[in-house]
Amino acid sequence: MATTIEKQLNKWDTLHKNGPFPLKLLYETKLEGERVMPDKIERYNDAAHEIQRLLRETHHTNEGFRAYGSAWSMNAIASHKDRMHFNASMNISLPIHASQCHEDSTYDPTNLFLFECGNTIKEISETLVQNGKSLKTSGASNGQTIAGCISTGVHGSGLDIGSVQDYVVGLNLIIGPNAEDIVYLEPASRPALHDNFISTLQARIIRDDALFYAALVGLGSFGFIHGVVIEAEPLFLIKRYVKKIKKSLAFTLANTMDFENSEFVIPEETNAQGKGNRPFHYKIFINQYSNEPDCVVEIMYKKPYRESYPDPFPVIKESVYRDLIYLFVKIAENFPKSIPWLVKRLRKTILPKVDDETTGTLKEIFWDAPYQGPAFACSFGVDHTHSEKVMGLLGKLTREEGPIPGIFALRFVKQTKATIGFTKFPITCMIEIDGVLWKKTRKIMSLKEYCRRMIEVLQENNIPFTIHWGKNSDWAFNGLVNYMFGDQAEEWKIQRKKILSQEMQELFSNNFLKTVGLDR
């Protein structure tokens, strides 16, 4: 039988030290051993019953419950003051076979896999590679769990792929302690799994588009995500280039996404007419403290997989452009800890001329995050046609009302179908500032004040925007969620009420959900 370790605590913190937050009890469920219970589905179902026991126990004490994976989010979204569950030991994976697919399925069954909630992106990628497959996209690194990724909408930066939740085809949710409270949810418009296979998971079948797309980015509040069925794709390579180009040219590409007719051309990445190919990934790095006319861009192209390609890790490990937090911390380590002093040096060129090139699989290019200490990250989603204007507004705010110990990057992502997914624009530009945490001083505003001012500046300039659910922000800002999502936020609440009883709505709520007004 699955067993649960209990720890009495008084606080819990995120990986990047954004708390601490109050907590009474921490659970960690460990699966029964393979020797005792060799059948994966039996062990999977056994774990589900253990989670239901914990939910029953929590309900009887009139307390709340929250699951988390890698504690990657930089706010209180994963926390609960009462009871939390650490999912990392729940990492079963199952390939889906043709006989287990719905009779109306349009998926290639060899691309379908069921992953238990505690599987990290790194673990999933390793499993897929063994099967000749790859994730379609991932975040900037690989430490998050699959359940955590989709709960907050981790977005990657695929121009034509979307976010992590956008290749999820089904969700196995535990919505309460009773037998009928294990459900399998998928869209009615595109079913994936056969009823007979779903019955082996002891799950009640719900096929409902509106409910599925609301639960996709569910903020951890649609029940306990036990399993996620994803659509992978055949293994591919990525050719990654890092170039220094004119800012004006970088933003022209951001605003138009017209790579074919751009004067920026990588000779190896052109069509028969010599026009630029559309990339898989496009990212702009902006040092808002520098007046230089150039900036650094990272641009990637998909390639057919081949066995023989140079080892990408020597370049990836040494690339200062792969992780802005790491870049900023490395600078900070070499200078006094005075932020104004550091920012003064940032006004000089810190992004050198580069011509990095490397080739690797998705899991190799988007590799381990090198920095896991105290950090902040703010991330706004806007329509890509507003990217230059918004970067100008936020850069001006950061210079004139700062200084703030971080620098900006822009990534571009295909629109999501998730009801409150923050990549909601046809092409969403995610404008993010990453850096090291700081303490408010007489000369430097607090992180909360900075987050509030960014919201105010964008609203004052009538810019529609969203905010990454897993990042720092002034989440208590009046009317914030309504401004970002309008009627879609109300639709999300309607769907949540449709699947959860009133008691379970309260059990799976937390202070974050109440702060943003999505709890009822």
Image (cartoon, helix red, strand yellow):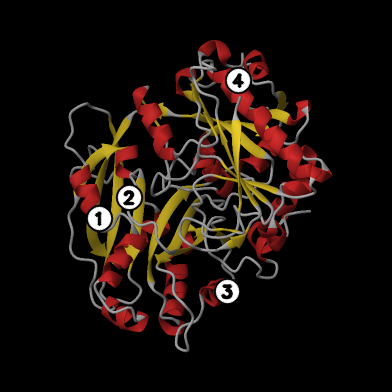
Q: Check disc 1 and give the amino acid type.
A: Phe
Spatial CA span between label 1 and label 3: 36 Å
Q: 10 Å neighbourhood of mark 4: few (<14), some, or many (≥20)? A: many
Task: Give how far across and how far down residue 241 sits, in percent.
Answer: 24, 49
N-terminal of the pair, mark 2 or mark 4, is 4
N-terminal of the pair, mark 4 or mark 1, is 4
Q: Check disc 2 and give the amino acid type.
A: Phe
Task: Give how far across and how far down residue 489 sits, in percent.
Answer: 70, 53
N-terminal of the pair, mark 3 or mark 2, is 2
Picture residue at 25% right of the left edge, 56% below the top: 263
N-terminal of the pair, mark 1 or mark 3, is 1
Residue pointed to by mark 2: 259
Residue pointed to by mark 3: 452
Q: Check disc 3 and give the amino acid type.
A: Arg
Residue at the right extreme, as displayed: 502
Picture residue at 58% right of the left edge, 74% below the top: 452
Residue pointed to by mark 4: 193
Q: Is 40 above or below relative to 217? A: above
Residue pointed to by mark 1: 264
Give 310 or 3, whichever is nearer the viewer. 3
Q: Is 338 above or below relative to 70? A: below
Helix, strand, or loop for circle 3? Answer: helix
Q: Quadrant of the N terminus?
A: top right
Picture residue at 50% right of the left edge, 31% below the top: 91
- With 11 as the anchor, is 436 left or right in this view? left
Task: Give how far across and how far down residue 329 sits, in percent.
Answer: 32, 66
N-terminal of the pair, mark 3 or mark 4, is 4
Spatial CA span between label 3 and label 4: 45 Å
- Label 2 or label 4, whichever lies nearer to me, is 4
Spatial CA span between label 4 and label 1: 45 Å
